[in-house]
Image: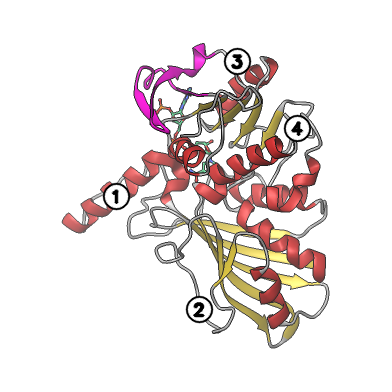
């Protein structure tokens, strides 16, 4: 039980508490022992009145539209971009420090975009907007590895293909994958559902996530470029991506090609990646080993494998990464931001 009466412990709120990220936030607040003076839960009017267990306490879900944040110190928002655009500034104006999981404020100059293992230093006090943004779920594990490469060798270009799980589309995405898979097994000729994804996901791969931009890239692909630049403090970093949805329930994977500014030694690269906090390198000693979404292990680590320097270009290397998008890519990063703010007395 992490509920305490200590007046220095924060009062918490979660907007989007009934969703995939919100439920993971509730679980992490308890399992990580984040001390607090209470957790308010909010969601849409559809969920108002539902009772949810929070760290052993039955907690009633409120309608976000009627939630007063004036007695909240930290408000986690994970109810979608449009909901954050409508309510997060109000929560901040009422006094809560908002940690936002959506795309609403990530590129706002008054809003820091934070991966604590990479750029916690940009947090020096309450941001001008009252909001700290959590990056996109594919960007977070990528920049956690790129920061070490940039520091040692410098980076010329990064080329990424993502393999993103259904849970990236929340609870409804998981349901659509499960139902579509069952239907396809029962009736191979059936028309499969495609409401949450751009094409049916069961037994398929879909190279299109979020909306199409005039550039021909998708918004998801643009997010990875813009957010990597902002987090790493490298405004001209060359990152180019193809984002693909795959029929995996949870955990995103990425095939990453990095061209460094100088030749890279595999042994040193692997040692530097393995020394990063909460990173597991699977082929540290036995080349070729790899994590998968089903077998990676600790869901709070970024998992790396198949690290290989190109024989024809010793500045270039490939790696494969797997990271739990609901935890590393969203809820865990948000909780780690809160822990960092509290440890450093920045609230
Ligand atoms: N899933 C991921 O891997 C991931 C990773 C990074 C960031 N994110 C971002 O996190 C946000 C939530 O994602 P999710 O996967 O948790 O989605 P989800 O499972 O669909 O959950 C959405 C949550 O938002 C609530 N909500 C929806 N419309 C609302 C409204 N008008 N007012 C108040 N609450 C509303 C829902 O409440 P009801 O249950 O009442 O409908 C639910 O609690 C999204 O912006 C997403 O882009 C997700």
Compare marks 2 and 3 and give the one earlier in the sequence: 3
Residue nearest the viewer, comparing 328 with 135:
328
Compare marks 3 and 4 and give the one earlier in the sequence: 3
- Categorize mark 2 by other alpha carbons within 10 Å: few (<14), some (14-19), many (20+): some
For the C terminus, give its image quadrant: top right
Q: Secondary structure at mark 1?
A: helix
Magenta region includes residue 8? no
Per the rendering, the mark at residue 178 is: 1
Per the rendering, the mark at residue 209 is: none
Q: Of all residues shown, which one is farthest toward the left?
A: 186
Mark 1 beta carbon near ligand 1 (under 8 Å): no
Q: Give the distance between the C-alpha atoms of the residues marked 2 and 3, in whole angstroms.
A: 50 Å
Residue at 39% from the left image edge and 44% from the top image edge? 173
- Categorize mark 1 by other alpha carbons within 10 Å: few (<14), some (14-19), many (20+): some
Residue nearest the viewer, comparing 168 with 72:
72
Residue nearest the viewer, comparing 42 with 167:
42
Q: Secondary structure at mark 4?
A: loop
Q: Which residue is mark 4?
A: 346
Q: Nearer the viewer, mark 1 or mark 3?
A: 3
Please provide percent x and percent y for residue 79: 51, 30
The part of the image, by quadrant, that contains residue 99 is top right
Q: Secondary structure at mark 2?
A: loop
Range of magenta residues: 38-67
Q: In the figure, is residue 255 to the left or right of 168?
A: right
Compare marks 4 and 1 and give the one earlier in the sequence: 1
Residue at 47% from the left image edge and 55% from the top image edge? 251
The relative height of residue 171 versus residue 98 in the rendered view (above or below) is below
Q: Nearer the viewer, mark 4 or mark 2?
A: 4
Q: Which residue is mark 3?
A: 71
Q: Give the distance between the C-alpha atoms of the residues marked 4 and 2, in whole angstroms.
A: 41 Å
Mark 1 vs 3: CB contact within 8 A: no
Residue at 77% from the left image edge and 30% from the top image edge? 127
């Amino acid at each position: 039980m992490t509920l305490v009466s200590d007046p220095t412990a924060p009062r918490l709120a979660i907007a989007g508490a009934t969703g995939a990220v919100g439920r993971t936030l509730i679980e992490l607040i308890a399992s990580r022992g984040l001390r607090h003076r209470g957790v308010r839960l909010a969601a849409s009017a559809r969920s108002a009145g539902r009772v949810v267990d929070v760290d052993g306490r039955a907690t009633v879900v409120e309608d976000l539209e009627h939630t007063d944040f004036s007695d909240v110190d930290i408000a986690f928002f994970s109810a979608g971009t449009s909901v954050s655009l409508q309510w997060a500034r109000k929560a901040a104006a009422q006094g809560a420090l908002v940690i936002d999981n959506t795309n609403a404020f990530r590129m706002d100059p008054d809003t820091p975009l934070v991966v604590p293992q990479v750029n916690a230093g940009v947090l020096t006090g309450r941001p001008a907007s009252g909001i700290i943004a959590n990056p996109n779920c594919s960007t977070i594990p990528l920049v956690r590895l790129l920061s070490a490469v940039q520091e040692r060798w410098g980076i010329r270009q990064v080329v990424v293909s993502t393999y993103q799980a259904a849970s990236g589309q929340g609870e409804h995405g998981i349901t659509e994958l499960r139902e579509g898979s069952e239907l396809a097994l029962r009736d191979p000729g059936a028309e499969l559902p495609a409401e949450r994804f751009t094409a049916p996901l069961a037994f398929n791969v879909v190279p299109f996530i979020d909306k199409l931009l005039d550039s021909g890239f998708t918004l998801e692909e643009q997010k990875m470029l813009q957010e990597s630049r902002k987090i790493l403090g490298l405004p001209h970093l060359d990152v180019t991506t193809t984002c693909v949805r795959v029929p995996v329930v949870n955990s995103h994977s990425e095939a990453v090609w990095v061209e460094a500014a100088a030749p890279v030694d595999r042994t040193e690269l692997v040692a530097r990646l393995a020394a990063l906090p909460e990173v597991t390198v699977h082929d540290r000693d036995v080349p070729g080993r790899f994590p998968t979404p089903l077998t990676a292990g600790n869901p709070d680590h970024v998992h790396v494998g198949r690290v290989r320097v190109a024989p024809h270009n010793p500045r270039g290397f490939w790696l494969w990464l797997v990271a739990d998008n609901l935890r590393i890519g969203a809820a865990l990063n948000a909780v780690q931001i809160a822990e960092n703010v509290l440890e450093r007395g920045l609230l």
